[in-house]
Image: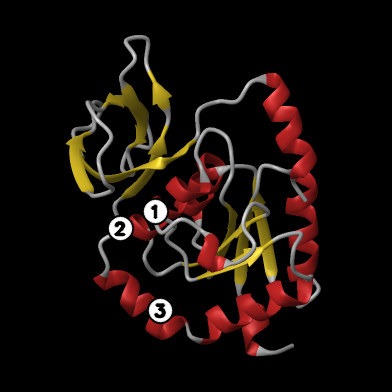
């Protein structure tokens, strides 16, 4: 077994079949793999022990992968991250707000590519973690929709207490770093709103259609 394959990896995905498949692929190379069904479950695991690397889906309920990975970078800059999704063909197509060391297009590339990506990220871990600590990582927030008064709003999750709260925004502006105090613990939450993407909850028909398109 090589020195690269003795590290622990946390796989985060809301689809049980994807979690199992990705875990088996990584275990086949000797990695010690744990899994979590969403961002909140993953953060609870991170409080107990930190893995060398996280492989996380970007489209998940409750806490999106974009938001989860931004929390990870802020609180655990030493942890490496590979983002994965079936919605994008390659890393260049992923919205700029995603905070990760590499990208894996699940369902569009073979498992060997995942192993190569993970190995390369771990091989260059020293320089990556140093860069992480120098970077400022605000919370990435997509546009959630409009409230009952017709005004756009977002939902922020505090990276300190992990509680979520809605925040009304008066107009659609170009993405820029902003800040607001958490209504629960008063921690200053830095965030970016991307109005070009919406994560408003889809209807039943839309959810069924999305489910058929995922790999």
Q: CA distance from mark 2 to mark 3?
A: 14 Å
Give the secondary structure at mark 2. Answer: loop
Relative placement, left or right, of 6 versus 135 is: right
Q: Position of residue 88 (x, y in %)?
A: 62, 57
> From mark 1 to mark 2, how far is it between C-alphas?
6 Å
Give the residue number, with chain letter if any, for mark 3: 128
Q: Look at the numbered disc 3 and give the secondary structure of its residue.
A: helix
Q: Is residue 11 left or right of residue 196?
A: right
Residue drawn at the location 25% of the way across and 40% of the way down: 173
The residue under label 1 is 70
- The residue that label 2 is drawn on is 137
Q: Mark 1: which secondary structure?
A: helix
Pick the residue in front: 88 or 137: 88
Numbered circles on residues, count? 3
Kindly indicate the quadrant of the structure image that contains residue 77.
bottom left
Residue in the image at 53% along x and 49% along y: 45
Ranked by sequence position, the earlier of labels 2 and 3 is: 3
Q: Is residue 174 above or below residue 90?
A: above
Dot 1 and dot 2 residues touching (CB under 8 Å): yes
């Amino acid at each position: 077994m090589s020195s690269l394959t003795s590290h622990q990896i946390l796989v985060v995905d809301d689809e049980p079949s994807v979690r199992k498949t990705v875990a088996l692929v990584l275990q086949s190379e000797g990695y010690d793999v744990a899994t979590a069904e969403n961002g909140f479950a993953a953060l609870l695991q991170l409080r107990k022990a930190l893995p060398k690397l996280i492989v996380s889906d970007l489209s998940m309920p409750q806490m999106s992968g974009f938001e989860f990975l931004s929390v990870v970078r802020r609180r655990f800059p030493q942890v490496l991250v590979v983002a994965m999704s079936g919605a994008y063909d390659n890393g260049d197509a992923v919205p700029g707000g995603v905070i990760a060391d590499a990208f894996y297009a699940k369902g569009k590339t073979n498992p060997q590519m995942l192993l190569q990506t993970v190995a390369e990220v771990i091989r260059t871990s020293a320089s990556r973690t140093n860069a992480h600590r120098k970077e400022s990582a605000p919370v990435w927030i997509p546009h959630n929709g409009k409230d009952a008064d017709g005004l756009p709003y977002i939902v922020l999750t505090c990276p300190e207490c992990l509680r979520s709260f809605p925040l009304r925004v008066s107009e659609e502006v170009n993405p820029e770093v902003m800040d607001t105090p958490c209504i629960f613990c008063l921690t200053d939450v830095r965030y970016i709103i991307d109005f070009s993407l919406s994560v408003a909850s889809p209807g039943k028909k839309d959810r069924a259609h999305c489910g058929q398109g995922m790999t």
